[in-house]
Image (spheres, rainbow, N blue to C red):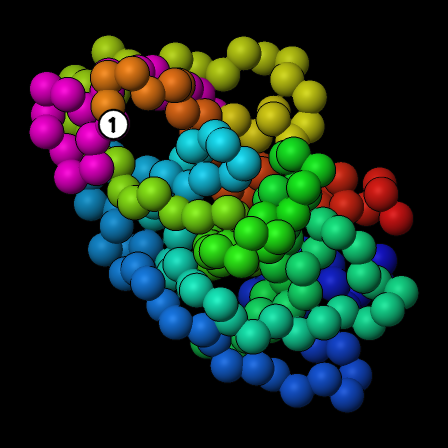
Amino acid sequence: MSATARPPEGGAQLPRGVERSEEGSAVSAPGHAMSQGLSWLRFRVGGQIHALEAAPVRQVVLAPRLIALPSPERQPHCAGLMAWQGRPLLVLDLGTCLLRRSSLAGGDARFLVWTQAQQAGVLAVDGVEGLLRLSPATLTRHWAPARPGLPAPWNAIQGLLHAGEGAGDRPSASLPASADPIAVFDVAALWQACWAEAERSR
């Protein structure tokens, strides 16, 4: 894949002759507001609920205008480019990356704009389930580190939040006691793993 679609360090370059589009409707606050306390953004891919640390997530966007990549660059993992704050960001389809089925197929996809250090990008997911906020004490009781040696992209999992977390703290987005464990991903590691998979599939 050419440099027009490489993981952006401050934004990918637009292909020649393509105009920037406007963002879709924003449905969440910037990541700085979400980062107070121990917070994760829960999202859905297939029938599973996963989570990302909330702080790097700057915006959740509904139905943005996507800029198609040139024909030689198109592949299932890369949904296109999305304009955000005046720069184009590459959109990776997390459903394709994790489950080999597109998050865009259901028509209810959400687009998670994230930035961390000099990196930035967009992950398309099936849906967003809201924030989960936990106290340090609750986190200690219900957190388990990820097992080493998981294959990519699952090696981007930082740990698991087990069933029943939040019951004592009454967080704003508590989980039912019967909930399955939630895999918590490192967003930059997940992005890089999905990008590497996209490169291998060319």
Above or below 44: residue 57: below
Above or below 23: residue 48: above
55 or 26: nearer the viewer: 26
Name the residue rendered at 60%, 44% in the picture.
94
Crowding at label 1, few (<14), some or many (≥20) Cα neighbours within 10 Å?
A: some
Q: Residue 147's image quarter?
A: top right
Where is residue 16 shown, x and y percent of the image?
A: 79, 83
| Residue 27 on the magenta span | no
Observer able to see residue 124: no
Main secondary structure found in the magenta portion: loop
Name the residue rendered at 75%, 51% in the picture.
76
Where is residue 153 shown, x and y percent of the image?
A: 65, 31
Name the residue rendered at 70%, 77% in the picture.
14
| Residue 172 on the magenta span | yes
Where are the magenta residues, as a range?
Answer: 158-175
Please state, as top left, top right, bottom left or bottom right, where the N terminus lies in the image.
Answer: bottom right
Q: What SS does tag 1 mark?
A: loop
Name the residue rendered at 64%, 68% in the picture.
81
Residue marked by disc 1 = 175
Report the side of 73 relative to 66 (left or right): right
